[in-house]
Amino acid sequence: MAEVTSLATGRSAALSDQIAAVIPGGVDSPFRSFQEVGGYTLFLSKAEGAYVFDVDGNRYIDFLGAWGPAILGHCPKPVVAACQQAIASGPVFGAPCTLELNMAQALIAAYPVVEKVRFVNSGTEAVMSAVRLARGYTGRDLIVIFEGCYHGHSDSVLASRDHSASAGVPQSVADNTVRVPYNDSPALAKLLAELGQQIAAVLIEPVAGSMGVVPPEAGYLEQVRGLCTKHECLLIMDEVLTGLRLARGGAYELYGVQPDLACFGKALGGGMPIGAYGGPAEIMNALQPVGQVYQAGTFSGNPVTMAGGIETLKLLSEEGVYEHLEARAAQLFDGLRPVIAELSFPVQLQRVGSMFAILFAPHPVRNYQDSLQIDNQRYAKFFHGLLSRGIYMPPSAVDAACVSRAHSREDVDTMIDVCSAVLRAL
């Protein structure tokens, strides 16, 4: 059984106070805050393989994975070497480069639904641009999103949980976004029957990663695809989290449902900031300078990011990568189930491939309303119990944790032991 320890993190605490004086909340993204679980954010100094290290010298087995990008583990040597070589020749040109061409060809080969692609700098940019493209291509304004799905922080998509999710979003923008429950095809059918001729696109996470790793129920994505085809609106698949992680061809490969546009990010860059969106040439050619839909970015397709992405796609093509991810994730859940059964704990284990969540909920979570039953306070105690014993998980009760290619059997055994000790302590 894992030894119960309490790691010293005094320097992180001091730095958290200092940074809050110059950066709102002490973070550049609210996800990084420990607001939901309490306490101060750790300051990390290094990441390598399956581990991250804080400024106090503590090592943690990392199941956050930088919120998804670290599918190969941190700092894979071929990716680092390729990025170093690229930056030595110039980190940004403001003009096309061969790495950009090679990366586009590699992504299209991995995700054959995409005939043409545009690179941007984040998943938020990818979704924001795909939504604008859908509106420009169809000449319609309304976008359908699903309660509890997360698509970044652009105005059009911030209303997936609540139309008041953020101040500063004009009501006129929110009014052009319509919500329906996830995993409820009758609700979508009813909405499209009423508003189909006004809807530009249906935007969906094929696996909902921010309300408990909720998979689509059997046949659900096929039904969504059929309804979009029937009502002549585009299906946008937000694969920012699932792309490359569930399979090299993402959720498209796993479920066999073809989107009209797909969005990517996170794992695609091997740790570099990246986003991408793509689809059939007919739709993508609506973008300027060929068509009339505008999208631009000074750092889009920069050589360093492209070099990292190319190497990442190569490494993910190697034999056994996805088998390893599946084996480690399955090992974790197989190890936790007996403990949960023994303690009769209200814990749900939910995963798809290497995405997983440990949810303190009375029943499996299949939609946003179910996710509201998750016990955030109990997760906060669980989170800090793990953290104090050297396990780094998302500081959020609902967001996806991840297994990486770098996690060993021994790493996962340690995770099982620590989780077991913390659950018993709870």
Image (cartoon, rainbow, N blue to C red):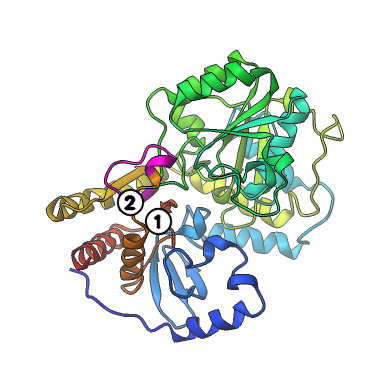
Crowding at dot 2, Cα within 10 Å, few <14 / some 14-19 / many 20+, comes out as many
Determine the residue positioned at 48% across, 74% down. Answer: 42
Which picture quadrant has residue 37?
A: bottom left
Which quadrant would the N terminus be assigned to in this image? bottom left
- The x and y percentages for residue 326 are 34, 44
399 inside magenta stretch: no
Determine the residue positioned at 15% across, 56% down. Answer: 343
Q: Is residue 84 left or right of residue 412?
A: right
- Circle 1 — which element? loop
Asked if residue 415 is positioned above or below residue 258 in the image, the reply reads below
* Residue segment shown in magenta: 353-370
366 inside magenta stretch: yes
* Residue nearest the observer in this picture, 31 or 186: 186
Tell me which amino acid carries mark 2: Leu
- The x and y percentages for residue 206 are 49, 35
Residue 16 visible here? yes
* Residue nearest the observer in this picture, 319 or 313: 313
Q: Is residue 108 left or right of residue 60?
A: right
Q: Is residue 6 left or right of residue 241?
A: left
Which picture quadrant has residue 9?
A: bottom left
Tell me which amino acid carries mark 1: Ala
Mark number displayed over residue 5: none
Residue most extreme to the left: 342
**First of labels 2, 1 by sequence position:** 2
Q: Name the residue beneath numbered marker 2.
A: 359
Residue most extreme to the top: 230
Asked if residue 70 is positioned above or below residue 57 in the image, the reply reads above
- The x and y percentages for residue 135 are 74, 30
Q: Are marks 2 and 1 in contact (CB under 8 Å)?
A: yes
Q: Name the residue beneath numbered marker 1.
A: 397
Separation of marks 2 and 1 at Cα, in angstroms: 7 Å
